[in-house]
Image (cartoon, rainbow, N blue to C red):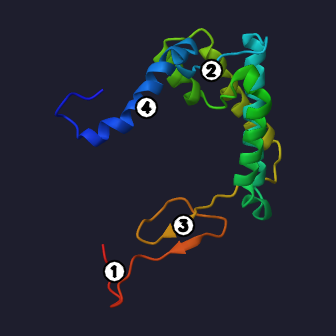
Amino acid sequence: MTWPGTSPRNCSVPSSPAQSCGWSWGPTALRLHLGATQPGGGLRSGQATGLEAAMTAALLLMIFFLTSHRRTARWTPLGNWILVATLVWQAAPYTGTSLNPARSIGPALVAAYLPNLWVYVVGPLAGALLAAAVFSAFKNTHTLTAKLFRDVRYPSTMAAELPTTSRRPFATPSGVDRP
């Protein structure tokens, strides 16, 4: 809502529908605990923790194995997209498909709805530990590192093991670098 004289008249017209949406959806957001993830679909907390751990382990193992070979590393973003979309599609009714403690901690703290927060902290952390243990069992496999661009102006302590695109500093037609 704007006070008279504090905003141009043409700015208050477009903001009215947005304010109406906020006013009408506010009670719904409160009823849904402001987006705090919580077990559903008849799952108990322990079952939701196991499902979150399994989903996180699957995601991390897919990333680890795809980035451990030169031929498959470039497909990691596509694999991520497909796997996360499938997990959300299939598991969202049961756990909300958090996969990340930060995704659950923020809304839970804002909504002050903390009874099942431990599920979304313990599950993904257990899944990450499980994925690390499984991946470390493959002795001859290690993840390769890469950078999207290498800029000579910024030295890095992380060497890229995969091919990268080199980004040259900005240059003017006279050949002098510009800031």
- Residue 92 location (% of width, % of height): 73, 26
Q: Which residue is mark 3?
A: 149
Q: Is residue 118 left or right of residue 10?
A: right
* Residue neighbourhood size for the residue with mark 1, other residues' Cα within 10 Å, grouped as few (<14), some (14–19), many (≥20): few
SS class, disc 4: helix
Q: Tell me the quarter of the image containing the N terminus.
A: top left
Q: Measuring 75% from the left and 13% from the top, which residue is drawn there?
A: 46
Q: Is residue 56 above or below residue 39?
A: below
- The residue mark sitting in front, 2 or 1, is 2
Q: Measuring 76% from the left and 10% from the top, which residue is drawn there?
A: 44
Q: Measuring 35% from the left and 84% from the top, which residue is drawn there?
A: 172
Q: Which residue is mark 4?
A: 17
Q: Amino acid at mark 3?
A: Phe
SS class, disc 1: loop
Q: Which residue is mark 1?
A: 177
Residue found at the very far bottom of the displayed protein: 174
Q: Is residue 157 above or below residue 123?
A: below
Q: Amino acid at mark 1?
A: Asp
Q: Are marks 2 and 1 in contact (CB under 8 Å)?
A: no
- Disc number placed over residue 37 in the picture, else none: 2
SS class, disc 3: strand
